[in-house]
Image (cartoon, rainbow, N blue to C red):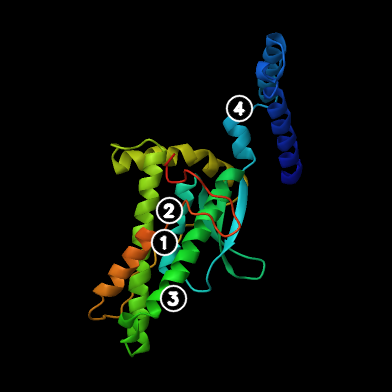
Amino acid sequence: MGARAMTADLTRIRARIQALRAMTTDRGCTPAEALAAATKAAELLAAHGLDEAALETALAEAREVELAGRRTPLDNLWPVVALFADCRCYHSSSSSGGRVIVYFGAPAAVLVAEYVHEVIRRAAGDGLAAYRASADYQRRRLPKTRAAAARAWLTEFVVSVGQQLVLGLWKRKGLDGVSPEDGVARIQAALSPLDDELARRGIALRRKRPLAAGKTAVKDIGRAKAAGAAAGRAVRIDAPLRGAAPAAGLLGEQ
């Protein structure tokens, strides 16, 4: 059976299970009818050798998001976005040869990843444009020192936003008080079914090395770094995009 046909079958199975589980006493079914529906749902899963987690994993989606032509410090942040959204991610090329990051996970999870990615991308673009219009940037005359200042701004922006994402993830997962090592181990273990599903589909995760710091030495770069860090702290991951519904509770806030 091809992957597309298998996905269609799994989608029908999930729809049938959801319909059975909707048969509750709250919706007018008798207790006997509700019990029979729940039993049928369990039998349907068992007949296909599935449990709920396996069904969701088998229906995982891959969603491509275009990246800039060249690597930038922002690329170091996308794996954190994936982790935050309960996804995996990997780099690939689009049909036109452009760079893309692929978020892979449950349909709702990849939508969260795409949403957070876009919030961060827009905030970085707007913030960097504002910094380039600032006196601190404009006073630098050489292209290489301006580029180094912009890179320093973006690097600190990435660090600051990354800290927000990790803190939000820790809060949402109830990991307050858990050591970073144990917390990461728990999160990675929960995502291991996605690794297995990627392997089943013949996709190897090849994560790129973090982008190294620039080599241009620039004096008085502190203001650029401070501005980037402040801009990162000001990013509201929960803020809706224009025309989009609010993504309430992404950072663990109720």
Q: Amino acid at mark 3?
A: Ala
Occupied quadrant, residue 134: bottom left
Q: Which mark is residue 129?
A: 3
Occupied quadrant, residue 48: top right
The reply to whether the C-beta atoms of the residues labelled 1 and 2 are less than 8 Å apart is yes
Q: Residue at x 65, y 26 (%)?
A: 49
- As drawn, is 135 to the left or to the right of 107? left
Q: CA distance from mark 2 to mark 3?
A: 24 Å
Q: CA distance from mark 2 to mark 4?
A: 28 Å
Who comes first in sequence, dot 4 or dot 1? Answer: 4
Question: Under tag 4, what secondary structure?
Answer: loop
The reply to whether the C-beta atoms of the residues labelled 2 and 3 are less than 8 Å apart is no
The reply to whether residue 97 is in sight is yes
Q: Which residue lies under the disc numbered 2?
A: 80
The reply to whether the C-beta atoms of the residues labelled 4 and 3 are less than 8 Å apart is no
Q: Amino acid at mark 1?
A: Asn
Q: Which residue lies under the disc numbered 1?
A: 76
Who comes first in sequence, dot 2 or dot 3? Answer: 2
Q: Residue at x 37, y 87 (%)?
A: 143
Q: Residues within 10 Å of mark 4 (few under 14, many from 20)?
A: few
Query: Quick one: quadrant of the N terminus?
Result: top right
Percent position of residue 11, x then y: 72, 37
Q: Amino acid at mark 4?
A: Asp
Percent position of residue 81, x then y: 46, 53
The reply to whether the C-beta atoms of the residues labelled 4 and 1 are less than 8 Å apart is no
Q: Which residue lies under the disc numbered 4?
A: 51
Percent position of residue 70, x then y: 49, 74
Percent position of residue 178, x then y: 30, 37
Q: Residue at x 32, y 37 (%)?
A: 176
Q: Residues within 10 Å of mark 3 (few under 14, many from 20)?
A: few
- As drawn, is 91 to the left or to the right of 201? left
